[in-house]
Amino acid sequence: MSEVPFIPRERLIKQQQYFQNISKHTYLKGRYDVITSVTIPLALAVSSGALIARGIFNMSHGIGKKA
């Protein structure tokens, strides 16, 4: 016995053709893929860069030392 598919076959073929014809990179083809592939890593890089810069500034000025 075969299972009933989640999506009708015609709709699945239509979606496959749509994604295969997009000229973007494979990991950016979905609607919200830019958020997970670009925005989140960029935000992590910016925040870690800011924390590193703050740490270097504090070390060079002797701020935040514990007795």
Image (cartoon, rainbow, N blue to C red):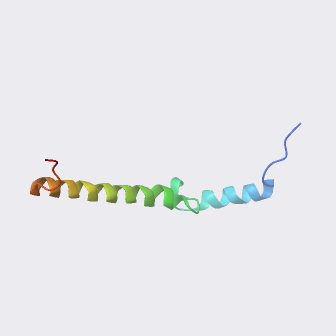
x and y, in percent, of residue 3 in the image: 84, 42
Q: Nearer the viewer, residue 50 or 38?
A: 50
Quadrant of image for the N terminus: top right
Residue ranking furthest to the top: 1
Residue ranking furthest to the right: 1
Residue at image coords 65%, 61%: 18
Q: Nearer the viewer, residue 12 or 38?
A: 38
x and y, in percent, of residue 55 in the image: 20, 54
Q: Along the horizontal axis of the image, is 47 left or right of 39?
A: left
Q: Along the horizontal axis of the image, is 5 left or right of 42?
A: right
Residue at image coords 56%, 61%: 32
Q: Nearer the viewer, residue 2 or 55?
A: 55
Q: Along the horizontal axis of the image, is 62 left or right of 25?
A: left
Residue at image coords 57%, 62%: 22
Q: Along the horizontal axis of the image, is 55 left or right of 32?
A: left
In the rendered image, which quarter is residue 16 located in? bottom right
x and y, in percent, of residue 29 in the image: 56, 59
- How many numbered dots are placed on residues in this image? 0
Residue ranking furthest to the left: 61
Residue at image coords 10%, 57%: 61
